[in-house]
Image (cartoon, rainbow, N blue to C red):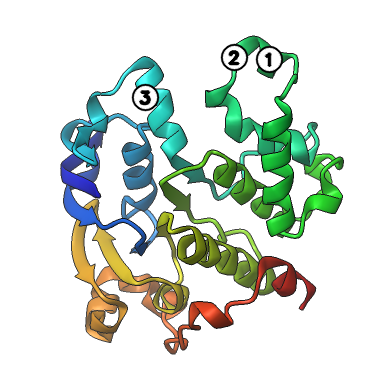
Amino acid sequence: MLVVEGLTCRFGKKAAVDNASFSVAPGAFVGVIGRSGAGKSTLLRTINRLAPASEGRVLFKGVDVTALRGKQLRQWRARSAMIFQQFNLVGRLDVLTNVLMGRLSEISSWRSLAQLWPEQDVAVAMSALEQFDMASLAAQRADQLSGGQQQRVAIARALVQEPEIILADEPIASLDPRNTKIVMDALLRINKHFGITVLCNLHSLDLARSYCDRLIGMASGRVVFDGAPAALTETIARELYDLEANEVMGPASVHMPVSTVPAVGEAAAA
């Protein structure tokens, strides 16, 4: 279980995350919602230790990850894989190499610099690409892909880390509606079929209601809502989003049972 206790992250005098506390059970799909600047991205980055905690702590299976250093910290970042809004791929490298970078914590520095990847790791990376209908593009440069394709590569890279938690920071913010569905379906399939816990920052309330088991609402760095999507009333949503409410609110979509969620390749072909 992931436990966040009184977590605060300050930049100067401003608290981007302010005394956040919650726990997440294994296998949950949790949406973190709120207006721009609410602290959603900083929350995930602090959990992953890309941003330093000013106060409080993060526990995973009883281990205080806010105190980890060196090799143990690198291992935690592998177990809590990040997916970023802007993909964070190396454009000049091919797709397969970008995915293999998810295995960096498992191999020596000289092997990674020389790109001498173990055969088993290459097989794992190709298998991940096949799951996202991207194996045919393994030799293509990452900067030649569409935004939706690049995000699928980023998800494949996260998957080969063999994580226990995926922290997705606005993974569909720069995508069109078709690729938004492909990427969200991919995250849902990883969650349901592999049992990997997903914390996903989402600006769209409609998407959050459709895909997530639970919503954590943030405002001014604080957790102000924590519950099932059905418990998020229009009044609470308008308090969360303020002037942005009309942009993010829409009719709640019907959540597809996982048995009817198309495989990623099927969605891409649709």
Say above or below: 67 vs 82: above
Q: Tell me, yes or no, whether the two marked residues, 1 and 3, touch with CB atoms within 8 Å.
A: no
Locate residue 144 relative to residue 118 in the image: left or right: right
Q: What is the distance, in whole Å, between disc 1 and disc 2 at their CAs?
A: 5 Å
Dot 3 or dot 2, earlier in sequence: 3
Q: What is the distance, in whole Å, between disc 1 and disc 3 at their CAs?
A: 21 Å
Q: Tell me, yes or no, whether the two marked residues, 1 and 2, touch with CB atoms within 8 Å.
A: yes
Q: Which residue is mark 2?
A: 108
Would residue 158 be seen by someone viewing this image from the given angle? yes
**Quadrant position of residue 34:** bottom left
Task: Name the foreground residue: 177 vs 106.
Answer: 106
* Residue at image point 24% right, 37% down: 9
* Residue at image point 48% right, 82% down: 257
Amino acid on which disc 3 is placed: Leu
* Residue at image point 34% right, 62% down: 28
Q: Estimate how packed mark 3 is, as few (under 14), some (14 to 19) or many (20 or more) residues with alpha carbons within 10 Å.
A: some
Locate residue 30 relative to residue 126 in the image: left or right: left
Q: Which residue is mark 3?
A: 73
Q: What is the distance, in whole Å, between disc 3 and disc 2 at their CAs?
A: 16 Å
Locate residue 64 relative to residue 124 in the image: left or right: left
Amino acid on which disc 1 is placed: Arg
Amino acid on which disc 2 is placed: Ser
| 1 or 3: mark nearer the eye | 1
